Amino acid sequence: MDFLQAETMNERLKMMEKLKDGFFERAAEIDENNGFPFENIKELKESGYTALTVPKQFGGKDISLYEMIRLQERIAEGDGSTALAIGWHMGIIKNLGEKGKWEDDMLEFIFSEALNGKLINAAATEPKTGSPTRGGKPETTAVKTDDGWLVNGHKTFTSLAPALDYILVSATIEETGEVGNFLVPAASSGVRIEETWDSIALKGTGSHDLFVENVHVPHQHFVDVRSKGKKGAEGWLLHIPACYLGIAQAAQTYAIQFSKEYSPNSIKGTISELPNVQEKIGEMELEMMRARSFLYSVAKQWDEASKADQADMLPELGAVKLAVTNAAIVVVDLAMRVVGAKSLSLKNPLQRFYRDVRAGIHNPPMDDMTIMLLAKSALERGN
């Protein structure tokens, strides 16, 4: 039985539990070698997981946002890099199904490709513009031709790059100045991936630089235009905090197990019986309970909301990301305090968890933007 054949969320969570253990076993080697989780991605594709967010009418399961983040969290317990990388594909496909902004033939095309195990991610960040959430306009350009478009540019942080089949490239349209999105097959002539990813965190995401050099894009692959004005709410981006929550859970699990087994000759029993250790474990549990409750409740709120109500959920979505990622950092820090100096050994997974959760601060939306959005929302509500 694969993920598409499973009938319930609990069945799919149990299936992911088994895959997650293999991801954990490979994580250290991928991290040490600055590698990419090819085997993990292959298993996720072959198991049908990467098709779960495809709408039902196109052959998928159209799983809820709540279920998607639960599954993504479970992946991250095994390997955070794998979770964040595949989360972009899962979320983009889900978002397309929910909003249907593309023409019907292009939606049918990309959903069919996803059902066949093809992967997609967006390439929007650039060296000079930074994250598109800051409002920067792409220096990547699209020029209209008789038979399509000619796209040129340089993108950064193209996660999942070694495994991508399609890349959603944002570009400024030379004629109008609008920002458009172009669906570019990764195998297109002129598409080049330069392996520049040298981050100390989430080494396995394969977030390399993308170069598009005189890439010809057919007319129908110009799929949408970036809307002006108020930024819309994107529930699928909750895959980001779900990833860091999963990493934090892995850290807590490790620390608890260590405390139950470590017994220095200066005490009777194990360190799990010491009040100061129990205090840290309790603090971890509190952080996890608060973060998980917040994340799950907002995901369920999204699933149950109307399109109009979803559009107003930007403050809640940003708040969840801020709260969960920062809680994850606290949990990993507490786990390292329980384990002590051994947590800094390259052979210990906690040092990897510590580096990986720090990346959450730099995923969108940024903390400062969220705080300002929450302030604005509170001020407007007070009128």
Image (cartoon, grey):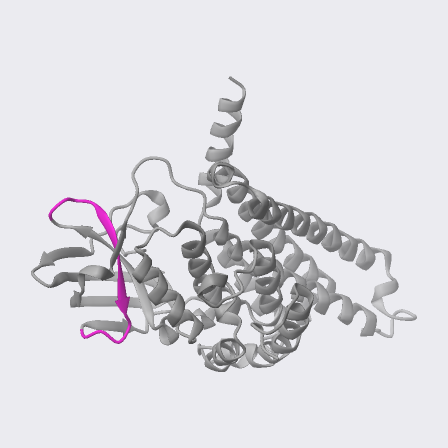
Q: Residue at x 48, y 76 (%)?
A: 45
Q: Position of residue 320 (x, y in %)?
A: 57, 46
Residue 108, picture quadrant: bottom left
- Bounds of the magenta segment: 175-189
Task: Check the image and name the residue furthest to the right.
Answer: 268
Residue closer to the observer: 3 or 349: 3
Q: Residue at x 65, y 68 (%)?
A: 13
Q: Is residue 186 magenta?
A: yes
Q: Position of residue 79 (x, y in %)?
A: 56, 71
Residue closer to the observer: 164 or 204: 164
302 vs 281: above or below: above
Give the position of the N terminus as an image quadrant: bottom right
Q: Is residue 206 visible?
A: no
Q: Is residue 189 visible?
A: yes
Q: Residue at x 50, y 23 (%)?
A: 379
Count every numbered label the image shows and give the total: 0
Q: Position of residue 197 (x, y in %)?
A: 37, 69
Tell me: 109 left or right of 175.
right
Q: Position of residue 118 (x, y in %)?
A: 39, 73
Q: Residue at x 69, y 61 (%)?
A: 335
Residue closer to the observer: 359 or 290: 290
Task: Check the image and name the residue furthest to the top.
Answer: 383
Q: Is residue 74 magenta?
A: no
Task: Check the image and name the residue furthest to the left.
Answer: 146
Tell me: 6 left or right of 281.
left
Tell me: 112 left or right of 338.
left
